[in-house]
Image (spheres, helix red, strand yellow):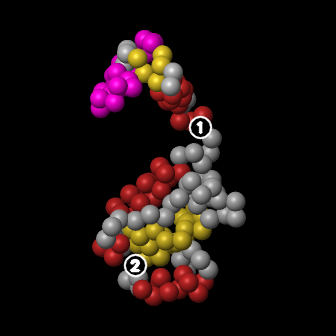
Amino acid sequence: MRFLLRRHPCPWLSYESPGDGLSGRFFGYDIFPAQARTFSFLMLDLKATPISELPLGLLWHLDRANIERDLGRSGGEHIILVRYAEKHNPHHEWVYNAAEIDAADVIWARSFGTERDQRLRDYFHDRSIWYLDADVQPPRLLPAS
């Protein structure tokens, strides 16, 4: 493994080594592996990019958080059936829930067609039902009819 001795411009991003003898401070002024240098420069490049210039869809998790927050504030209990496009990016997963699903104000589930969706609607009959088209920009949330 190669090591570099380099003064790094971000001393506040430091990680003390657990005693493995491979590095001093991860983002400090000491010796560290070359991979750490590569990661730190990637991180600095991301920090320099204004949010308005990021590609559409990159901040999908913020859209999800805003939808959940807004529905939570509106009161009541909700279930969101998420519809994905055919070429959906599997790394942009909208469907995940709290540990106590039945007690959650907002529940996320995948839409698998009318018959399977109806089983969810029957089980959660006291909740407001929403459909979310996750792969359009901006994501579209529609009340179920």
Is residue 83 covered in magenta?
no
SS at badge 1: loop
Please tell me which of labels 2 and 1 falls first in the chain: 1
- Relative to 28, say whether 53 is above or below: below
- Relative to 8, say whether 115 is above or below: below
SS at badge 2: loop
Which residue is rendered at x = 33% and y = 76% of the image?
102
- Name the one closer to the observer, 142 or 21: 21
Residue to which mark 1 is pinned: 54
User: Spatial distance from mark 2 to mark 1, Cα to Cα?
Assistant: 35 Å
Quadrant (top left, top right, bottom left, bottom right) of the C terminus? bottom right
Question: Over which residues does the magenta segment extend?
Answer: 5-27
Asked where in the image residue 26 lies, by quadrant, the reply is top left
Residue 48 in view: no
- Dot label at residue 127: 2
- Relative to 111, say whether 13 is above or below: above
Q: Is 19 on the left or on the right of 78, as rendered?
A: left
Task: Tell me residue 30's x, y (percent).
Answer: 37, 15
Which residue is rendered at x = 29% and y = 32% of the image?
18
Task: Tell me residue 1's x, y (percent).
Answer: 50, 25
Which residue is rendered at x = 37% and y = 14% of the image?
29
Asked where in the image residue 89 lies, by quadrant, the reply is bottom right
Looking at the picture, which amino acid does disc 1 mark?
Answer: Leu
